Image (spheres, helix red, strand yellow):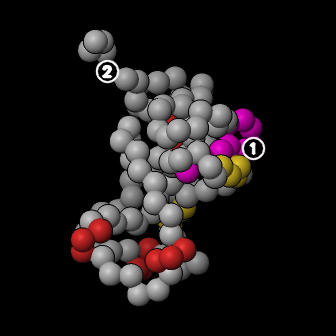
């Protein structure tokens, strides 16, 4: 068994695509003007030309959740390799998808400090 750590976004060549194992599909791509994002199971893949790399997410264990409606519409999928899945080419988060603006600054939650990205433009609202 190898003890060499896997490369990370920080120590990889940012000019070359970086596609770590993060789901069942391995056909993602990034090129000028377009990149892909793939769901965990690989059944759904989208191509996009712009995106946001920040979102507010939360995780709730099933035993603490009650469905109000729509439970019959859900399908279940599980995988154990990773839960870190967004854009297929992880180097894009530090290159083309690096934030250029922060919107709704007036509504920023109190526990989130100022975003420290050089050259970022801030807007109180939309």
Q: Residue at x 40, y 66 (%)?
A: 56
Q: Main secondary structure of the magenta part?
A: strand
Q: Residue at x 68, y 52 (%)?
A: 46
The residue range painted magenta reads 30-39
Q: Residue at x 55, y 50 (%)?
A: 39
- Residue 89: image location, x then y, percent: 57, 37
Residues 18 and 109: in front is 18
Task: Answer whether labels 2 and 1 touch (C-beta < 8 Å).
Answer: no
Q: Residue at x 47, y 38 (%)?
A: 22
Question: Furthest residue to the right?
Answer: 33
Instruction: Give yes or no for residue 35 being in the magenta stretch.
Output: yes
Q: Which residue is mark 1?
A: 33
Q: Which residue is mark 2?
A: 5
Instruction: Give yes or no for residue 111 being in the magenta stretch.
Output: no
Q: Quadrant of residue 121?
A: bottom right
Inspect this view and state whether residue 98 appears: no
Q: Reply above or below: 98 against 59.
A: above
Q: CA distance from mark 2 to mark 1?
A: 31 Å
Circle 1 packing at 10 Å, graded few (<14), some (14-19), many (20+), is: few
Residues 5 and 21: in front is 21
Say which quadrant the N terminus sits in: top left
- Residue 13: image location, x then y, percent: 52, 23
């Amino acid at each position: 068994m190898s003890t060499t750590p896997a490369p990370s976004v920080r120590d990889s060549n940012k000019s070359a695509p970086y596609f770590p194992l993060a789901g069942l599909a391995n056909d993602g791509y990034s090129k000028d003007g377009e990149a892909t994002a793939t769901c965990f199971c690989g059944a759904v893949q989208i191509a996009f030309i712009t995106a946001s790399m920040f979102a507010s997410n939360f995780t709730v264990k099933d035993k603490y959740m009650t469905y109000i409606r729509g439970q019959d519409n859900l399908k279940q999928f599980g995988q154990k390799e990773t839960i870190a899945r967004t854009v297929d080419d992880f180097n894009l988060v530090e290159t083309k998808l690096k934030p250029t603006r922060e919107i709704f600054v007036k509504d920023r939650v109190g526990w989130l400090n100022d975003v420290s990205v050089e050259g970022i433009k801030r807007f109180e609202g939309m």
